[in-house]
Image (cartoon, coloured by chain):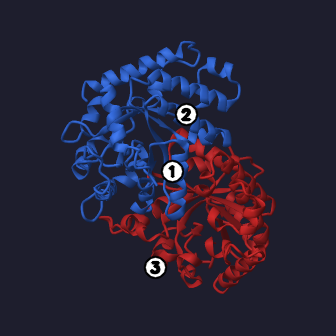
Chain colours: A red, B blue
Amino acid sequence: MPDESTPRFSDRLLAAIGAVGVPACVGLDPVLEQIPHAVRAAHPDPPAATYAFCLGVIDAVAGIVPAVKPQSACFERLGPPGTLVLHEVCAHASRRGLAVVLDAKRGDIGVSARHYARAAVQIGAHAITVNAYLGMETVVPYLDAGLGAFVLVRTSNPDSDAVQRARLADGRTVAEMMADHVAVLGAGHLGTAGVSDAGAVVGATKAADGPALRKRMPNTMFLVPGYGAQGGSAEDVRELFDSRGGGVLVNASRSVLYPTPPEDPDWRHAVALAAQRFTDDLRRVC
Amino acid sequence: MPDESTPRFSDRLLAAIGAVGVPACVGLDPVLEQIPHAVRAAHPDPPAATYAFCLGVIDAVAGIVPAVKPQSACFERLGPPGTLVLHEVCAHASRRGLAVVLDAKRGDIGVSARHYARAAVQIGAHAITVNAYLGMETVVPYLDAGLGAFVLVRTSNPDSDAVQRARLADGRTVAEMMADHVAVLGAGHLGTAGVSDAGAVVGATKAADGPALRKRMPNTMFLVPGYGAQGGSAEDVRELFDSRGGGVLVNASRSVLYPTPPEDPDWRHAVALAAQRFTDDLRRVC
């Protein structure tokens, strides 16, 4: 159960966004082969290299962006030490004032969902991505545990169209149906600024579908992947705004994590510059 | 990449089913509060208790059922030691000749999906449950890694109707659309007996939808949760058979794991008896 003294996720996120002035998130997707050689040389053990790289990235982007999104898979592939690294990475991000969205795309029910929620809290996440193909009972345990939950509605990958753009008999797409479910659930979990702890994942590469989804989810925070390396632009993000010109948390991963080849000894500086470019770009529209 | 000398999952599973003569699977969902008191007393540390309980269950059901399905959430909630326990549990199940289906309901794309697949292989799973709301590119990396993949099509929980029974403009339900995707993908991954490594999760509690789904997935192995404690019966399972009266792997969790109160000192015997009752019941129809 959430502690009464702990802020709601939506309030925490909005405060963090307010502090830096731009709704940007850096995805922590550490892929061993792309980690700077200087880090690999100093830390031959893969979990240690992953830890050192993520801490370097967090220190480089703290104060520039308000949030990070660790990709659980990249840590899980390292076995039990990877889970430990993920925990330490989340703790460090929190210490640096960053909101932490665990990208785990979990989706289960009952006691399993409650266990996943507890695991995410223990790991130190403030929010988690959730796959609700099993229905909205999948999402509730995360909210009950005090986490924000970003439900996959319209994802950025090309192949998602075959499922999410399928047209229902009532005229909605499957994604729009999911959006309606998120809006209904979210209405019961509003923070002090009127933004819900039940958010939605809507890809920047699917901006054409954005206005219809926003209409169905007026008070929902959109986590927006697909920016940068995947092709989404600042103009695409504009299509996803709420009526106040906000309501988005835009994520970039590869373009910020790996702006230069792994041979670059000055990679921390390059990451900070890439984060600055990302936020400058976003500020043109946000 | 899968080793050429490693059998395909579908062939491994069919061989295991053939050896005991019944397509039954025991779900390993260790919930600390329900673990027998004798185990808790001997192992005060939660991961150690979980390990001892799961090994006891595996030893009790080996030779009676052909497969087990560890629920990843129950291990993840224990933190890094939980992942280690999951690894040991899968290894022990394999040693006892059981097929291991990791119930992780993972769903991601690209490098993240490949990382999840690698993590599942490292853990010692032979197959994994996959949520394909992001499209079938979510499923491919598991098959490429040599794992069986059971795609969530029609899950056993009540709330799933709101998504999976939604009617498309072309007359199919969302679940039937997912079934068609599974059938197309699966056709490229057939084992020697003509059964695909791309399977489907179809709940015993949704047996009314079974015949329509089976028609769309004639060569697909159905992983069937919801049997026993959730209300599904042997008669329900019959609705899911393929044309040869097979094609199902029926799972029971709570009814086999916790047949007597946790005070029962003779819990191993009770678990073996419950597994026997489960398989006797199934044999009436399978």
Q: Are marks 2 and 3 on the same chain?
A: no
Residue B103 in the image: x percent, y percent?
Answer: 48, 43
Q: Which residue is situated farthest in the front direction here? A: B5
Q: Amino acid at mark 3?
A: Ala
Q: Which residue is mark 1?
A: A107
Please say if B32 is above or below A229.
above
Report if the CB atoms under discs 2 and 3 are less than 8 Å apart. Answer: no
Residue that appears at 62% across and 47% down: A79
Q: Is residue A229 above or below residue B229?
A: below
Residue A208: which numbered mark, if any?
3
Q: Which residue is mark 2?
A: B89
SS for dot 2: helix
Residues under numbered marks 1 and 2 in contact, where contact means CB atoms less than 8 Å apart: no
Q: State how far apart marks 1 and 3 are (Cα).
A: 27 Å
Say which amino acid is labelled 2. Answer: Val
Q: Nearer the viewer, residue A122 or B185?
A: B185
In this orientation, does residue A125 appear? no
Between the C-alphas of marks 1 and 2, the distance is 23 Å
Return the x and y of residue B273 as percentages of the image width and height: 42, 17
Whether labels 1 and 2 belong to a single chain: the reply is no
Q: Quadrant of residue B202?
A: top left
